[in-house]
Image (cartoon, grey):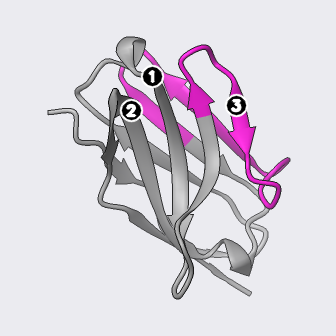
Amino acid sequence: QVQPVESGGGLVQAGGSLRLSCATSGSFFTANSMGWYRQAPGKQRELVADLTYGGRTTYADSVKGRFTISRDNDNNIMYLQMNSLKPEDTAVYYCKLVWGIAYWGQGTQVTVSS
């Protein structure tokens, strides 16, 4: 079952940190790419961070310097370390894993209070 499962969301005060996890039974060694997306109420889903098979990363301008995407290839878990959180980071966060086609997780809520 390659369907990814996110965890680690929650409520945090502005300036705080959270680490999201995305676990799958699929192998990261054969994945084309993986990434984190988020969707705030009334807004479209947007890319937060992306990690290619070769290790190249891409970040949304709004999170550069605060968020870090990483992966554990041995355990097939992807992470998103989020530091210096802001109220505007409040959203449902989704992970996406691609093996030819994209597999999305169910999402995890992140709420940042001011």
Instruction: Check the image and report above or below for 14 versus 74.
Output: below
**Of callouts 1 and 2, which one flags the residue occurring earlier in the amino acid sequence?**
1
Label 3 belongs to which residue? 57
Q: Nearer the viewer, mark 3 or mark 2?
A: 2
Q: Quadrant of residue 32?
A: top left
In this picture, which residue range is highlighted in magenta?
51-79
Q: Which of these two is toward me, 85 or 32? A: 32
Residue 15: horizontal and vertical position, in percent?
A: 79, 69
Q: Residue at x 41, y 31 (%)?
A: 77
Q: Are marks 1 and 2 in contact (CB under 8 Å)?
A: yes
Residue 89 or residue 112, whichever sits in front: 89
Residue 114: say if magenta.
Answer: no
Residue matched to label 1: 32
Label 2 Cα neighbours within 10 Å, binned few <14 / some 14-19 / many ≥20: some
Q: In front: mark 3 or mark 1?
A: 1
> Is disc 3 in contact with disc 1, using a CB cutoff of under 8 Å?
no
- Asked if residue 10 lies left or right of residue 48, the reply is left
Q: In the image, what residue type sits under mark 1?
A: Asn
Q: Is residue 74 visible?
A: no
Q: Position of residue 49 (x, y in %)?
A: 64, 45
Magenta span has 67? yes
Residue shown at 22%/41% (left/top)? Answer: 3
Q: Which residue lies under the disc numbered 2?
A: 98
Q: Residue at x 50, y 50 (%)?
A: 20
Q: Is residue 81 left or right of residue 96?
A: right
Please give the label number shown on residue 43.
none
- Whether residue 29 is visible: yes
